[in-house]
Image (cartoon, rainbow, N blue to C red):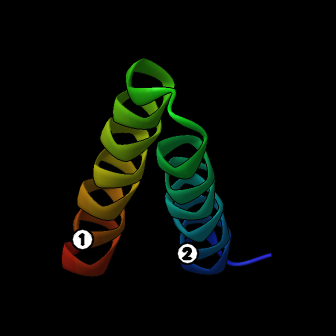
Amino acid sequence: MKPRWVLNLLGGICLWIAVVLVLGGSSAWALFAVVGGLLLLLARRGFKRG
């Protein structure tokens, strides 16, 4: 599997988890998921540079 594809998938999952948690009222877990998604996006940009 390509690293970019894996990061895209994980990033998408993190964003969906964040949306579900926000709707459920769990802001702490939603924030954690958003941070994880942003870290994956930054990592993906790093792969593009390489």
Residue 31's spot in the image, x, y percent? 34, 32
Secondary structure of residue under mark 2:
helix
Q: Residues within 10 Å of mark 1 (few under 14, many from 20)?
A: few
Q: Point out which mark residue 8 bears.
A: 2
Residue 43's spot in the image, x, y percent? 33, 55
Residue farthest along the right direction in this orientation:
1
**Is 8 situated above or below 14?**
below
For the residues labelled 1 and 2, the Cα–Cα distance comes to 11 Å
The quadrant the C terminus occupies is bottom left
Residue under the image location 50 percent in, 61 percent down: 15
Specify which label sits upstream in the sequence, 1 or 2: 2
Q: Nearer the viewer, residue 30 or 49?
A: 30
Secondary structure of residue under mark 1:
helix
**Is 28 situated above or below 36?**
above
Task: Single out the mark in the foreground, 1 or 2.
Answer: 2
Residue receiving disc 1: 45
**Is 18 situated above or below 26?**
below
Residue 35's spot in the image, x, y percent? 31, 38
* Amino acid type, residue under disc 1 in the picture: Arg
Residue under the image location 57 percent in, 70 percent down: 12
* Amino acid type, residue under disc 2 in the picture: Asn
Residue under the image location 28 percent in, 52 percent down: 38
Residue 20's spot in the image, x, y percent? 62, 53
